[in-house]
Image (cartoon, rainbow, N blue to C red):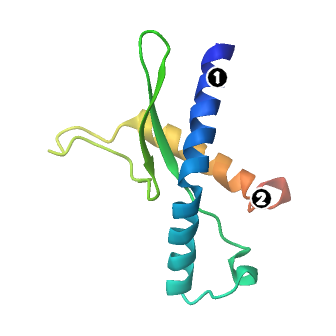
Amino acid sequence: AAALRRSVDRLVLLTWAAALPRLARATRDGLRALGLRSTAEWAGTFELVGIDLLVDAQLQVWLLELNGTPSLAIEQDPSGSTPPCARDGEVKAAMLADALALADVIPEGGGT
């Protein structure tokens, strides 16, 4: 388990390092398009990036994609004949809670 975690961490770090200049440019351009011109105005923002990985039977980690605009929609069968996937909603809700906690935007005591 520790070796797999190191492999995931290494791949994410190397992917992030390679993509950072392009992601930073896209973020800057997007914020400027919203009328935010200075880094002081950007201080209250954060970017959500998706990194999709595949782990094979030999525990080799493979990068599938880095997504600058990951979907937070609850996925369902395109035909609409089955209800949304409950696990998809659970995973995305937990990820979003973690992202907001990391960005320190949740008030102390849970916001109530």
Residue shown at the point (22%, 37%) measured from the top left: 82
Disc nearer the start of the sequence (1/2):
1
Please name whichever residue, 87 or 45, is drawn nearer the observer in this view of the structure.
Answer: 45
Horizontal relation, residue 3 to residue 65: left or right: right
Q: Position of residue 57 (x, y in %)?
A: 42, 10
Q: Residue 74 at x, y = what percent?
A: 38, 47
Relative placement, left or right, of 30 versus 96 is left
Q: Is residue 84 above or below residue 103?
A: above
In the displayed structure, would residue 38 be above or below residue 63?
Answer: below
Look at label 1 and name its amino acid: Arg
Tell me the quarter of the image containing the N terminus. Answer: top right
Query: What's under tag 2, amino acid-wise?
Result: Asp
Q: Is residue 86 above or below residue 110?
A: above
Residue 89 visible: yes
Categorize mark 1 by other alpha carbons within 10 Å: few (<14), some (14-19), many (20+): few
Can you identify the residue that label 1 sits on? 5
The C terminus appears in which quarter of the rendering?
Answer: bottom right
Q: Position of residue 61 (x, y in %)?
A: 49, 24
Name the quadrant containing residue 79.
top left
Please rate how many residues cluster around mark 2, counting C-alpha atoms within 10 Å: few if below 14, some from 14 to 19, many from 20. Answer: few
Q: Nearer the viewer, residue 76 or 98?
A: 98
Instruction: Give the quarter of the image for residue 10.
Output: top right
Q: Residue at x 84, y 54 (%)?
A: 109
Say the numbered circle drawn on residue 104.
2
Question: In 3D space, how far apart are the residues under numbered discs 1 and 2 (Cα atoms)?
Answer: 25 Å
Q: Cβ–Cβ below 8 Å for labels 1 and 2?
A: no
Regarding residue 112, the answer to whether it shows in the image is no
